[in-house]
Amino acid sequence: MKKIIVTVGLLAGLLKGAHAQTTNEKETYQKRKLKLEEVNLLSSYYGQDGNNSAVTGGIGTEKLGDFANSIDLKLSFIDRKSRQHNINADFNIDYYTSASSDNIDPLTVSSASKSDTHVYPSLSWSMKDDATHTTRGISYSYSTEYDYHSNGINFNYSKSSKDNNREFSLKAGAFFDMWTAILPAELRPAGYGSAAEDDRDPVAHKPRNSYNLALSLSQIVNKRLQVLFTVEPAFQQGLLSTPYHRVYFTDGSHTVEKLPGSRFKLPIGARVSYFLGDRLILRGFYRFYADNWGMIAHTLNFEASYKLTPFVSVSPFYRFNDQTAVRYFKAYGKHNPTAKYYTSDYDISGFTSHFIGAGIRLAPPGGLFGIKHWNAVELRYGHYLRTTGMVGNSVTLAMKLK
Amino acid sequence: MAKGLILFSVVASLSSCVTVKEYQKSRINDSEMELSARKSEKFEQSFYLYREGASGANGGKSGGGCGCN
């Protein structure tokens, strides 16, 4: 009898201990409130010049300057089911001047540059569930500039393997855009406006819709190597030409650029990152591109990031792009007046481009200049040139606060 | 030819993989090893969209959202 009482007593004690342990485990999985994880600040200047402006039919200045700024906030919280929710909000603003845009209405504008401000914020949410190894999300983007407005929406889903070495992701989205069709001054029909603030004559608004689907597969190959493959077919329809681009024909007449009302694009890309030795990281990107306008392009990007110290790295890079012209392209004065579609936009002509530069990144553990939350700073410069004669320069300053 | 090379690379990469445990991922998890464009490349990707005809498969826009190509 005594043995029975002792045994029951011991069992009761064990059960109570187990219950107490479960209560403690429940306390461990308390949800975490919304927290600001990271802030990224980005500021960039891009300047270019060339002599093949599409506004003047494939000749004339392409001088342009763009000062771009961005701030993005990453927030996160954990819900009662231990799923991590991430919210990303970003705000971007570009101020640009364009000498070629100045020639849309050359009779009335006297300065050498036209300017505009481009604002484009976005908001996204995603939820990561470690139990099922899945992440789901949605994002919305908006963009506005003088003659172009856009609303975009994207859905994304990804699933990783149990060991997190492989991940498949799918992203589907659409942009519903609207052009304000500003025409070259001399080609406007009677009563057609210029879209200037003090001009009350009507201007046409034309839609442009785009649909994208991105399928990606990433794989950790070994302790030093990982790769990513992406296929991203896209379909566009609507006004795909630029309303103020001119085209000149062999008979001396000219008109507005005209392109098909639909376009199908198929880019296929691959990325690789390899940690060589203790200090060198090699990053590569290759993209094959083809569309139903006849363009085929190959893009290759290579970067070597060398860690001078664990907290300072320098990254020289080189980017190569080679593209064939769309079938509707011809140079100034070369288009047949009976052609159905025509453009003299050198951005979709055949050329090879090179972009070469370097960046330096500092990320000391105690923060920069003793500021604990200033996690990293990066300065990056690149020189761009293409065989059409256009050259450009880009400098970017990026800061991370955590 | 290019599509065949990419397909071959996919198959070769997937078939030569080894299982890497979380505690072995110190190099893989380095911020410079990310399989995406750098934050500092954001505006460079913007001017590619305007100045070149090809787009997509790089984490940026593939079409739409701007008066670009």
Image (cartoon, helix red, strand yellow):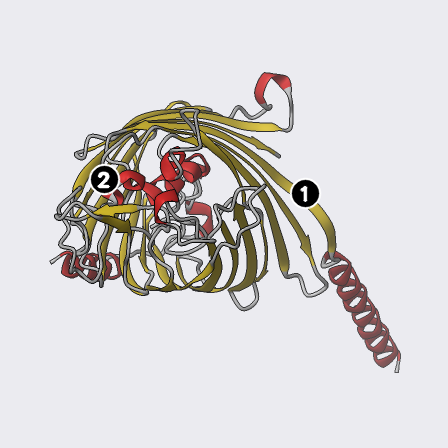
Residue A320 appears left or right of A8 = left
Looking at the picture, how far across and down is residue A362, in whole percent?
Answer: 48, 23
Picture residue at 46% right of the left edge, 53% below the top: A192
Disc 1 is attached to a residue of which chain? A
- Quarter of the image for residue B29 reads top left
Do tags 2 and 1 sit on the same chain? Answer: yes
Callout 1: SS: strand
Which amino acid, by three-letter code, is at mark 2? Answer: Gly
Residue A6 appears left or right of A140 = right
Looking at the picture, how far across and down is residue A74, in whole percent?
Answer: 61, 45
- Quarter of the image for residue A80 reads bottom right
Looking at the picture, how far across and down is residue A332, in whole percent?
Answer: 18, 41
Q: Quadrant of the C terminus of chain A?
A: top right
Q: How many marks?
A: 2
Estimate how packed mark 2 is, as few (under 14), some (14 to 19) or many (20 or more) residues with alpha carbons within 10 Å. Answer: many
Callout 2: SS: loop
Residue underneath mark 1: A36
Task: Name the one closer to the observer, B28 or A117.
Answer: A117
Residue underneath mark 2: A58
Picture residue at 51% right of the left edge, 44% below the top: A146
Q: CA distance from mark 2 to mark 1?
A: 49 Å
**Residue A28 in the image: above or below residue A298:** below
- Identify the mark nearer the N-term, 2 or 1: 1
Which amino acid, by three-letter code, is at mark 1? Answer: Leu
Looking at the picture, how far across and down is residue A397, in whole percent?
Answer: 48, 26
Picture residue at 88% right of the left edge, 78% below the top: A5
